[in-house]
Image (cartoon, coloured by chain):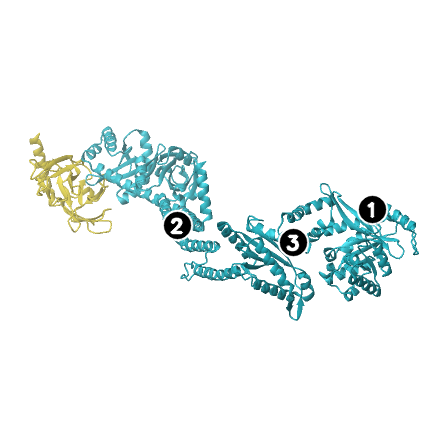
Amino acid sequence: MGMRRIWQALTHRLASSLGARVVALFLGLLAVVQLASFSAISVGLNQHARGKLPEQLQVGERVLQSLLDQRAQTLIEAGRLLAADYGFREAVLSKDRETIASVLENHGARIGASEVGWLGTDFELRATAGGEQIAGDIAPVATRLAARAASGGSASGIALFRGRPHQVVLVPMKAPVLVGWVLMGFPLDGDLGRDMGQLSAIDLTLLTREHADAPWASTLATLPPGLARQLAAQNWTAQDPATTGMRAITLAGEEFGVHAKWLTPLNAGKGSADTGAAVLALTTLSIDAATRTPRDLQLGLLAITLAGFAAFALGSLYTARRVTTPLRQLAQAAERLGSGDFDTPMQGLARSDELGHLAQSFENMRINVADKQQQILRLAYWDALTGLPNRAQIHDAVATAITQARERRGSVAFVMLDLDRFKHVNDVLGYHFGDLLLQGVADRLKQEMVRGADMVARLSGDEFAVLLPDGDAALAMSVAQRIARAFEQPLTLAEHKVDMGAGIGMACWPLHAGDATTLMSRAEVAMYAAKQRGTGPLIYDAAFDGASAETLSLLSDLRRAVDQGELRLYLQPKVALENARVVGAEALVRWQHPQRGLVPPMQFIPFAEQTGFIRVLTMWVFETAAKMWLDLHADGLGLRLSINLSTRDLLDQDLPEKFDALLVKHRVPAEAFCLEITESAIMDDPQRALGTLDRLSAMGFRLSIDDFGTGYSSLAYLKRLPVDELKIDKSFVMSMETDLDDAKIVRSTIDLAHNLGLSVVAEGVENAKAWELLRELRCDHAQGYHMGKPMPGSEFRKWSTGWVERRRSVGNSEAVTLH
Amino acid sequence: MQASLRLLLIGLASACAALSALAGPVVIQVTDAAGKPLADAVALLEPAAGKAMVQPMPDAEISQAKRAFNPRVTLITVGTKVNFPNFDTVRHHVYSFSQAKTFELKLYAGVPTAPIAFDKPGIAVLGCNIHDRMAAWVVVADTPWSARSGADGLARIDAVPPGAYKLTVWHPGLPADSVPTPMTLAVATGELRYAAKLAVSAEP
C-alpha cells in the first residue's frame, strides 16, 4: 500500500513535470525506433537465413560427397596396402580355397571391411570371405566396378548389402605385376555421421530401401531416431524437389529444410533389371534454429538499445533542463509578480531564443504592471474628479487614526455629508454641471478644514466625509455646523447660482463604534437620520439604528407577505367637491405583519422602490384593486380606483401588457383605474416614461400627476404628458389656511390645470374649512381625513353608505346630489 | 639316376649338332599393338609333337642395382640356376609366387649363399617385397629353341631343325595369368621370318 502510494506520487510527479514528459517522449520514440529496427533485422535475418538454407544444405551435400570420396580414397588406400601385404598375397596366391577365404576374412577384418572378395585379372570372383550369400552380393558389384577399376587402377562405389549401405572399393593386387583384384565392402556407419557433424552443423540421415516397393529405413542418422523415422516415413522419389533444392518438412513441430541426394547402389541393377533399390542421403537443417535471431546479435542490439536509452535519457534530460530551468525561473518570476514584487528584474534576458523572448515579454510586463499598479493605487486611493482621497483611503485613515487614538487614549470623530437634491441638479442641469458642483463642494470643504491632520474625502456620488483624527463629539459638531453654514452661501457655477444643502451626520470613536467600518456606517446612519428629519447635523444615536436594522430582513419578509397574503389593500375615498359624491378611491397597500402588526407604508415602500420589489407590489395592488372594483361594482358603487406607479414601474416596458393581461383576466375595463405617477418618477427617464404613459393612456387608463408642486417639473412639460389629473400635494393644502402663499399656489395651480384641461385633486383635506376653500377655488375632487382615512374594502362599503347618509342629514345648502 | 640323365643329355646334344647344319634360323619380329618393335619379348618354339630334350644352362644372374632387376627378362632353360647378387646398399626381399618357381630370398645383402634353381617350365614373376616397383621375369623354357627380342624387336632362334612347331610369343606386358595361344609353325631349311604382334604397349 505504502509502496503503491509512493509509486503513484512518483508517476504523478513524472506526469506533471515537463522535463519528465520530454524524457519519456524521447525514450518512447527511441523504443519504437529500436523495436522497429529489431523487427526489421529479425525479419531480414530470417529471410536471409531462409534464403541461405538451400545453399547451406547443398554445401552439406558437397561435404557429404567429399567425405564419401575421402572415405573411398582412404578405403582404396587401405585396400591397396592390404593387397600389397606379402602374407596376404602369399596366402591368396596359395590356391588353397580355404586358406584364401580365411585370409580374406582375417585381413579384411583388419581394415574393417565387412565383405572381401578376391577376383582374377578377368574380374571373375575367385574367392570370398564368408559364405555363398556374400559371394552373391559381391558378384554383381564387382562386375559394375570392373570397368572403372580396369581404367583407373581402382574403383569405389555404393552398394546395398543386406539392406544396409556400404562403400565398396576394388583394388588391384600386384605380385609385382597385376595378379588379381580385391573387392572390399565397408558399412556406412556412424563414423560418417560423426565426421559430417565435425565438418558442418548439418544433420545427415541415410535412408535405404531394398526395392521400389519397400519402405524406407533409416540406416544412419545424426538426428534423433524419432525424427529420422519421421523422415523415413515421407514419400521420396528420385524426382523429389529436395534432390535439386530444398524441401521444408515439419518434424515433431519443428520445421526442417531437407536436401536429398539420390545414390543408386551398384547392385541395384540396370535398365529393366533395376530393382529400385536406393540409398537416399538427406542433409537437414532446422529452419527454426536458422531463422532464430542469433543470441549475440540480440545481446548486441540490446546493448545498443541500452546505450541509446542512456544517451537519449541524458541528452533529453539536458535539453529538458535547458528548457525547464528558464521556465522555472519564469514561473518564480511570475509568482513574484503575483505577490506584488515588481522590483526584481527578470533573469535570462540574454538568451536569443524563444525563452529569451518570453523572458523579455515578462520583463516588459513587469515594468508595465508596475506602472499600472502605481496608476491603480492612485485611482484606488484618490478620487479622480475632485482630487480628494476616496472611500478606501479615508477608511484606512480612519483605521490608522483609531489605532493612534487607542494608544494615546484619545478619540476620533467622523463627519459624513450627503448633498441634497444633487440628483435633480444632475438631471436638470446635466452631468457636467453636476461634476462642477461636486468640485465646488470639494473646494469649499477643503477651505473649511484648516487643521493639518484632518482629511476630507469623497466617498461616492454626492457623499463626502471629514475625518477628525483627534476629534470628539463637540469638535465634530462644530465642524459640521461650520460646513452647514458654508453651504448656506450659494455656489456660483457657470453663471448659475446653486443653493447647496446637505444632510450631515457624525459619529465618534470610541463613543459610538469600536472600529473604522462601524464608525463610518454609524456616521452614515446619523446622516440619513438628519436628511430624513430635515434637521441640521446630527450626532449618531443608537435609536437611529433601529429603523435601518429593520430594513435588513425586510425583503424576505416582503416576499413572504405577498406569498402568504399578509398584504391588505386599503381604500381612501375621493369625493367630488361640487356635490360631495364619492367618485373614486385611492388604493393603498398596508402590511399586516404577523409579529409587528400593521407596518406603516413608509417602512417598506421606499425599500421596495430601492430593491425593485415595488413592481411585485404594484402588480399585487393592481390585481387586488381589480377584484375589489368588481365587488364594489357589484354593490352598485361605480368608482374609479387610483393606483400609484413608481419610477421602476414606468421604466418597465412590459407594464402595459401586464396590466392588460390582468384586465382581461378579471374582465375589468381600463377606465376603472386612474394611475398616479409622481413628478420625480417621470423625470428619472422622461423619454421612456412618456412612452409608457402614452401606451397606458391609449389603453384607456386615466393618468394623474401625484404630489404636484414638490418637484421641478413645469406645467409646460406636463402639457406634453397624456395626463388627465393633477394631485396637489397635501403640504400645500394643509398649510393653505395659514399660509397665503400656499393658498395662492393652490389657486393658480387649479386655474392653470383647468386651463390645460386637467381635473384637480387636493390631498390632505383634513377639515371642513379646507373643504369649503377648495370648493370655492373650484377644485374638482378632494381626498383627506375630513372625508375618510384609508380603510379596508369592507369598511369602505360601510363608510360609503354612512357618507351618503351623513351628507343627507347635514343637508348642505348647496345642491348636492347624492345617491 | 644322375648318370642316366647325363647320358640322355649328351645324346640330345649330339643330335642337335647333327641337325644344326640343316636347320635354318627362325626370326620373329615382335611388335606391340601400335606396330613398334618390342624388346624383351620371348619366343618359344616347341615341336608340335613330342618333346625336345633341354639341358640346364650355365648359372644365370639377375642382379639388383639401383632398385631394379637386371635384366628384366631372363630366358633360361629348365633346371638352370640363377644367382641374385644385390649391388644396392639397401636390402632386397626377392620373391616369386609364380607356379613356375615359388621362392623368396628374405632380406639379404650381397650375394645369397645359394642360387635358385628353376626346375619347372613356365614364367616366374619376380618382385621385391621391399620395393613394389621392382619386377623381373624369368622365362623357364622347356625347349632348346627360344629367343629373347632385342631393342629391334627381333628374336632370332638359330638351328631349328625343319619340322612342325608350336610358337609361343610372350612379353611381360601381357596379363600375368594369361596363357598365350601357341601358333603352329612349319620350319623348313633356310631362314623363317615370322611377325608377332602382341596386345601390349612398347612404351614403358
Q: Quadrant of residue B14?
A: top left
Left or right relative to B123: residue A702 = right
* Residue at 34% in and 41% down: A201
Q: Report the Cα–Cα distance between label 2 and label 1.
A: 92 Å
- Residue A465 at x, y percent in the picture: 59, 57
Q: Are marks 3 and 2 on the same chain?
A: yes
From the image, tell me which residue sits under label 2.
A313
The chain identifier of the residue carrying mark 3 reads: A
Q: Amino acid at mark 1?
A: Gly
Q: Amino acid at mark 2?
A: Ala
**Where is mark 3, residue-wise?**
A528
Q: Is residue B144 left or right of residue A650?
A: left
Residue contact between numbered discs 1 and 3, judged by CB atoms under 8 Å: no
Q: Earlier in the sequence, mark 3 or mark 2?
A: 2
Chain in cyan?
A: A
Viewer-nearest of discs 1 and 3: 3
Q: Which chain is yellow?
A: B
Task: Point out residue A804 in the picture as x, y percentages from the top left corner.
Answer: 90, 49
Q: CA distance from mark 1 to mark 3?
A: 36 Å
The label nearer to you, 3 versus 2, is 3
- Give amino acid for label 3: Tyr
Q: Chain of mark 1?
A: A
Report in which chain the residue with disc 2 lies. A
